[in-house]
Image (spheres, rainbow, N blue to C red):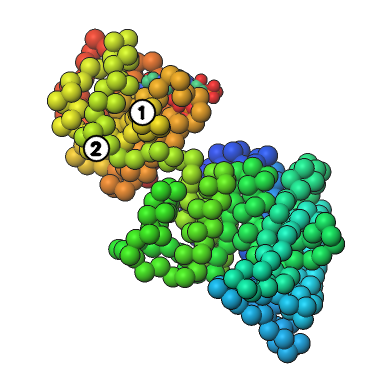
Amino acid sequence: MANRQNKQHQAFIASIRQAAPYIQAHRGATFVIMFGGEAVDAQFEQLVNDIALIHTLGVRLVLVHGARPQIEQRLKQNRAELRYVNGLRVTNDAALTAVKDAVGSLRVDIEAGLSMGLVNSPLAGARIGIASGNFVTAKPLGIRDGVDYCHTGEVRHIDAAGIHQQLDAGRIVLLSPLGYSPTGEIFNLSAEEVATAAAAALHADKLVLLVDESGLRDGRRQPIRQLSLLETEQLLRSRRKLDSGWVRHLNNAVDSCRRGVRRTHLIERRADGGLLLELLTRDGIGTLVSAELYEGLRNANIDDAGGILKLLEPLEEEGVLVKRSRELLEMEIDHFMVVKRDGMIIACAALYPYPGDIAELACLVVHPDYRSNGRGDSLLEAIEHRARRHGIKRLFVLTTRTSHWFRERGFVSTGLDQLPVKKRSLYNYQRKSKVLIKAID
Ligand SMILES: CC(C)(COP(=O)(O)OP(=O)(O)OC[C@H]1O[C@@H](n2cnc3c(N)ncnc32)[C@H](O)[C@@H]1OP(=O)(O)O)[C@@H](O)C(=O)NCCC(=O)NCCS
């Protein structure tokens, strides 16, 4: 019994420790979280609690809700219908009445949920302020191919300054899929569009889309945890049959990436605590579509050898890196990853696996003109991602001048005896390189 309790305590402590760097990194960040009207169901209280917890960690939160099922229910009650033409909704006068009723009532329910503060609830004493208002200006979709879309609109402007003011005051901002025009009209908007537009206008650190579909998987049924913008576009273009919901979500993620939102997380909303797992653990539970992480970053090919040599040469001359011949580099090109910008290789890194579950990270270099912009971090993250895919659990690096950079990123100093035998025998004692290692499983 005591043993079991001890194990539970250890697991709890390990979780808190794992979450700590994320809690630290998220404080003061702005997240836009979107969920469909389906999410306001029996499990909604759980979601509200998780949202409130993230808020109390100091994250600036903007929530965007959809209302599709509620609108459809109202329409049915009113014996009206929302027509779809070319995949777009036509909101006539009767449909607009249903939209207003459904959205208004849903908004009140969400606000009530977030206001809960019973003594025995997880939100006890939290007292969260919610702001909703006319933050979204809309314009009509208009007449397209002879079809008048009436009160269906698109986002024209997001009042980012107004939203930031509310966030500065510690409130959560709640946006509905409605927008108003300067002429005083109301437009029915898609919640996804409101969310992406808001995330872009606010320069949000993250857009989180809570989706109804179960997690995205690759051809071997393995969960896809990360995708670069390029990979997402390739997946959408590929012949792989994707669920229509996922096609929509991935397109939204691509859209938000292109508008400058660096990270879009797609999380299955039914997964208990999914939001917390995605935001507070390293591997997460959903799929992260990232523009920044891998912008221009890809595996190297033989044509990159010249560019890599050019990047490495000055550091080899300075003695920061060991000299590599062109022949050796060409032979080992598959180990390299590069960042290419405007036709020039501006950063690279290499991963050399050794027998067992250990690998060397080598040649991590960012061109001096492009440093201090997070590229080193992105490359390290990409190399770690690649290593994990190969079942590697420990990553080591030998460095003479950059040990602090690595230590700040979770590497710890270690002895030569921790290196694979083959590497140990090649160690150059004159260089006196420091050996650092990081557990990455
Ligand atoms: C180390 C290196 C890859 C970092 O690239 P980067 O794109 O500038 O990295 P990031 O933007 O992610 O991080 C930059 C931060 O690291 C710091 N940093 C850079 N070099 C450092 C070093 N040698 N020691 C400690 N910190 C260092 C920067 O000051 C900056 O911190 P700041 O944001 O607080 O100012 C780059 O400096 C480089 O190419 N160095 C020369 C090659 C090298 O030594 N490689 C490692 C051996 S394999």
- 37 vs 332, left or right, is right
User: Which residue occupies the foreground of this view, 264 or 282?
Assistant: 264
- Residue 352 location, x and y as percent? 24, 34
User: Which residue occupies the foreground of this view, 224 or 182?
Assistant: 182
In the picture, the quarter occupied by the C terminus is top left
Residue 332, numbered circle = none
Q: Is residue 23 visible?
A: no
The residue type indicated by label 2 comes to Asn
- Residue 313 location, x and y as percent? 28, 16
- 409 vs 90, left or right, is left
At x 24%, y 10%, the residue is 430
Disc 1 target residue: 344
The alpha-carbon separation of the residues under discs 2 and 1 comes to 14 Å
At x 29%, y 47%, the residue is 391
At label 1, counting other C-alpha atoms closer than 10 Å, the crowd grade (few under 14, some 14-19, many 20 or more) is some
Q: Is residue 373 visible?
A: yes
Return the residue found at the far right.
Answer: 184
The residue type indicated by label 1 comes to Met
Residue 301, numbered circle = 2
At x 67%, y 46%, the residue is 201
Q: Quadrant of ligand 1?
A: top left
Is residue 245 placed above or below 364 in the rendered structure?
below
- Residue 70 location, x and y as percent? 70, 77
State which quadrant residue 355 falls in: top left
Q: Nearer the viewer, mark 2 or mark 1?
A: 1
Is residue 344 placed above or below 294 in the rendered structure?
above
State which quadrant residue 415 falls in: top left
Q: Secondary structure at mark 2?
A: loop
Q: Is mark 1 within 8 Å of ligand 1?
A: no
At x 73%, y 89%, the residue is 79
- Residue 405 location, x and y as percent? 45, 24
